[in-house]
Amino acid sequence: MTASEVPPIPLQLFTLKDGVVSSDGGQEAVDNFAADFQGLRHFGTKVGECMDLGPPWMGTLQEEDFTLNFAYFDAGTDPQDPGAGALIGERIPMFELLTRVNSMEA
């Protein structure tokens, strides 16, 4: 599949820094992402505690009509540490997403 054949991904990007979520997508998008991110991070922290793995450094939430991802950079996994997130406007498995992104970059 060439780059011109790859359908665009409905994507919003978010920045995590100093405990604040920001984006060019507007305040409503930031609020929605922040709520889902906090819930996903809380769930990942609880699972990590039970399995002695520590807090999550990345996570993915898939709903019927969207996929949410977050990842912390190598600075750490504290809420104050820098990271990034994405809200994809469709349900898409991680492998398919990576394949589409790689096809777009090629």
Image: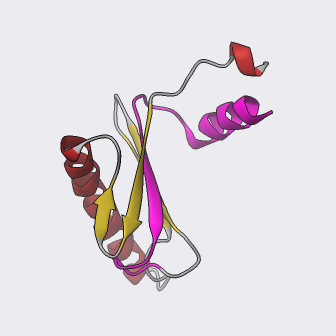
Name the foreground residue: 86 vs 43: 86
User: Quick one: quadrant of the C terminus?
Assistant: top right
Residue 60 at x, y percent in the picture: 45, 52
Query: In this rendering, is residue 92 above or below 58?
Result: above
Magenta residues span 77-106
Describe residue 101's horizontal placement relative to residue 10 as left or right: right
Residue 90 at x, y percent in the picture: 42, 28
Describe residue 85's horizontal placement relative to residue 42 as left or right: right
Residue drawn at (36%, 75%), measured in percent from left and top?
A: 45
Name the foreground residue: 89 vs 61: 89
Residue 83 at x, y percent in the picture: 47, 66
Query: In this rendering, is residue 30 above or below 11?
Result: below
Q: What residue occupies the far front of the structure in this picture?
A: 24
Q: Is residue 53 magenta?
A: no
Residue 20 at x, y percent in the picture: 28, 67
Residue 69 seen in the current view: no
Residue drawn at (66%, 36%), measured in percent from left and top?
A: 101
> How are the colours assigned in the image?
secondary structure
